[in-house]
Image (cartoon, grey):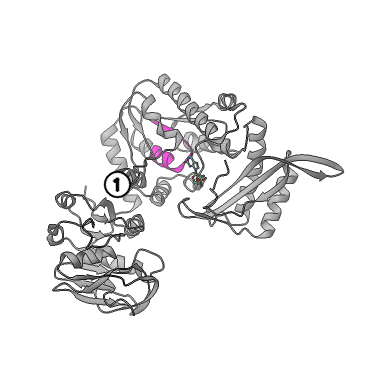
Amino acid sequence: METRQTLIVLDFGGQYNQLIARRVREHNVYCELLPYTTPTAKLLEKKPIGIIFTGGPSNTYDESAPKVEKELIKSGVPILGICYGCQLIADLEGGVVGQGAREYGRQKLNVSSSLLFDGVKKESLCWMSHTNYVEKLPDGFVVTATTPTCPVAAMENTARGLYGVQFHPEVMHTEEGEKILRNFLYNVCGAKGDWTMGNFASRTISALKEKIGDKKVLCALSGGVDSAVAATLVHKACPNLICVYVDHGLMRKNETEEIVRVFRDEQGMNLIAVDAGERFLKKLKGVTEPEKKRKIIGAEFIKVFEEEAKKIGAVDYLVQGTIYPDVIESGLGAGAKIKSHHNVGGLPDVVDFKEIVEPLRDLFKDEVRACGFEIGLPSSIVMRQPFPGPGLGIRIIGEVTAEKVGILQEADWIFREEIAKAGLDKEIWQYFAVLTNVQTVGVMGDERTYDRVCGIRAVTSVDGMTADWARIPYDVLEIISSRIVNEVKGINRVAYDITSKPPATIEWE
Ligand code: XMP
């Protein structure tokens, strides 16, 4: 098998670093985001076609400034330094880095002829975010771009394959950024564009076939996209995969049926669906505190799974849906946060297995989705909205009862149906209904009602870390409100949440 080309994105702590890696992948080039502390020999062992030095908050003249060994720059591997990365190249090559330029936001960029600017407009807008800048070029370098306030917006030494840009080509506000990155990858590094999800799926399936063969594999399917894609890849490679899906009774309307239909009926997987709703409700009886509910649901989930795993007996492999951001976050040590999703977190402790397989550990979320489509999963699974592990358990405020779950499922179903009908399902990142424990007076027909308030939440976001409330048109809101109140017994009022995150969170809990 032909080996895949690799580019390295060397992380100096900038806020856009994962974005740079994603942008490189979007150009069909596989890349790894590695900390700047990675020894040069280890980096070169990977035989990278190129290296990108990211931005970062440091000043090259600080004693503690993150640096690389000079051998890396001298290795002959093409390097593109972005922002701090550009200043670092200048510094290591004997140039001078000036202080206090303070250039933030959009700037007019003027470029001259360069492999990097092939097909790029002579004048365009770029995004700057820096205080330091390259004041004096190192020997052998030339300036290839300027802004009105930055004399070295780009520099290069083509003979050595060293390039630097002070602006950020990875952000969308840099008009020609996509072309510039592509030029570096294809014109400078000689990329072939061999990173596609079709290639990834077929390579991964072959590798899994070879590794696992007909050994016994276990996978916990949660209904989420990561475990779904991981399980399906393994299923396509191995005859002895057993999937366990624990239905805690707190899923959205029709969700369990859809999971069983797709994985058991369409994909032909050996799927054990455990109907554990009653068990969970019993445990949740009388509990109102959200963190307590989370803990109970998480612990019960592990218990149910453990019982199933015991029935299955010892397995050779346990499949986990770990994805690349989890690997980066745990690998870089900053916060050392590993996926804490309740229904995968504790499983390795309760399953008798020899090894973990993580078929998605190289993929970003958007790549997981593309891979899902590639291997034939439907959009209902691949484009599924984020959904908390404890499910509707945390979208019912106060005590969780079977009746409330039923009410919320109906309201949520109507909300989702109307959002899709209005064609808003692609632009709104996440939308769902919440059942509050507030009751208010209403009047229906000639009768007074004293029913619950249903909250509806719809947000736009990129990663769930920050979010804004979605501007749903009034007439769509009107239909949603009217349908929920008319069709769902137990709700007589609908409130739309117009709070961003921060200060609120996305879920209500
Ligand atoms: P918050 O409410 O903290 O949520 O703004 C941010 C995003 O995370 C989702 N969420 C979870 N996802 N397991 C998950 O996999 C969980 O336990 C969990 N809790 C919240 C939430 O839906 C939103 O997208």
Q: Is residue 246 above or below residue 386?
A: above
Depth check: 122 or 335 in front? 335
29 part of magenta stretch: no
Circle 1 packing at 10 Å, graded few (<14), some (14-19), many (20+), is some
In-image side of 295 versus 420 (left or right)? left
Residue occupying the point 35% across, 71% down: 102
Image x and y of residue 226, in percent: 42, 42
| Vertical arrangement, residue 29 with respect to residue 105, above or below | above
Query: Which residue is at 20% across, 68% downward?
Result: 90
Q: In which quarter of the image is residue 104?
A: bottom left
Q: Residue 326 at what x, y percent from top left?
A: 36, 44
The residue that mark 1 highlights is: 332
Local secondary structure at mark 1:
helix
Work out whether residue 257 can be spotted: no
Give the number of callouts: 1
- Where does residue 249 sit, x and y in percent of width and height? 57, 31
Chain part drawn in magenta: 219-232
Image location (x, y in percent) of residue 179: 33, 69
| Amino acid carrying mark 1 in the image | Leu
Report whether residue 226 is seen: yes
Q: Which image quadrant for residue 424?
A: bottom right
Quarter placement of the C terminus: top right
Foreground: 365 or 238? Answer: 365
Q: Which residue is drawn at 57% across and 33% down?
A: 289
Would you say 451 lies left or right of 257 here? right
> Is residue 221 a member of the stretch shown in magenta?
yes
